[in-house]
Image: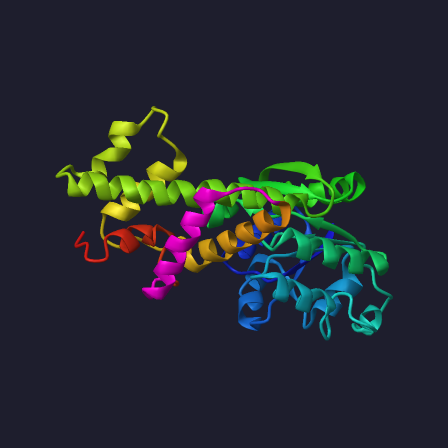
Amino acid sequence: MELGFCGPGLMGAAMIRHLLRAGHSVQVWNRTRDKAEALEADGARVANTPAELAARAEIVLLCVADAAAVEAVVFGAQGLLADGAENAAGGPARKLRRIVDHSSIPPSATRALAKRAAAAGVGWVDAPVSGGVGGAQAGTLAVMAGGTAEDVAAVTPAIDAYAARITHMGAVGSGQTTKLCNQAIVTATVAAIAEAVTLADRSGIDPSLLTEALAGGWADSVLLQTFVPRMTQPAMKPIGALRTFQKDVDTIAAAAAETGAPMPVSSTVQQVLRLGAAMGLAEADLSAFIDVLQPQRTY
């Protein structure tokens, strides 16, 4: 299958490599060209603009930072669906039939962008992922998809290359809403782990033993086993920036306001993350909840 991919960061690069190993032909574009060229050794081809991808691939996958970036890639100058983009590569008319957005953006923004794409005859599947860079590298991402059954079915063979499962959640925007549910659980849990680590430490207990002590019980989870070590040991290789959690929780708050859903726990987590940003921790690792609670910690 001929595919296009916009925005290969660390996660996107891992996904592209899985696509190539699965036998797909992949052309990539990144605002920072070096990131796209780094994938040439794996067999990817580099496009000069998103419009070139639209002229050559029926399906283009996106994995970019936010809604503004998605809009720019799709509808901006030289974008996938920019005016005149169908001939931007100097070849055949636009081949693009479906856009798969792996970015995490507000459901309302997704619906608005999908409506504009539909007017150009292009289907939209919002398909945010869970599993992080590690899941992308292992090919075990969980994908939650929104869109028509036809569109989701058409893009599933590509997504299967790097995902353990893809779940069709409903109409366009449903995938993004499901990702918000995921992030509400994740951020609240990581915040609770930071509180537990702090309580153990202040009580004279070695908090690093929590992973062993709680293993197999109701408090055990992948998050517990991942974040207790990151909060109790010297700096480990970062797995993401705290600002990502802040972006997601701000989006959760907006969705809660739009739907009238009471979310007191997420509201509290939102304030903790804002405090972390004010403390200069926005670029710190996701485990930096502990630094908000224990700014003077020495381990």
Which residue is at the front of the view, 248 or 48? Answer: 248
In this picture, residue 182 sits left or right of residue 188: right
**Whether residue 162 is visible:** no
**Position of residue 16 measured from the top left corner of the image (x, y, whole percent):** 59, 53
Taking the spot 61% from the left edge, 58% from the top edge, the residue there is 43
Q: Which residue extends farthest left?
A: 204
Please report the bounds of the magenta region as a residue range: 260-281
Taking the spot 44% from the left edge, 53% from the top edge, the residue there is 270
Q: Is residue 46 above or below residue 1?
A: below
Q: Is residue 74 above or below residue 180?
A: below
In this picture, residue 228 sits left or right of residue 20: left
Which residue is at the front of the view, 290 or 223? Answer: 290
**Position of residue 168 measured from the top left corner of the image (x, y, whole percent):** 69, 37
In this picture, residue 166 sits left or right of residue 121: left
Q: Is 64 colored magenta in this rendering?
A: no
Q: Is residue 210 above or below residue 277?
A: above
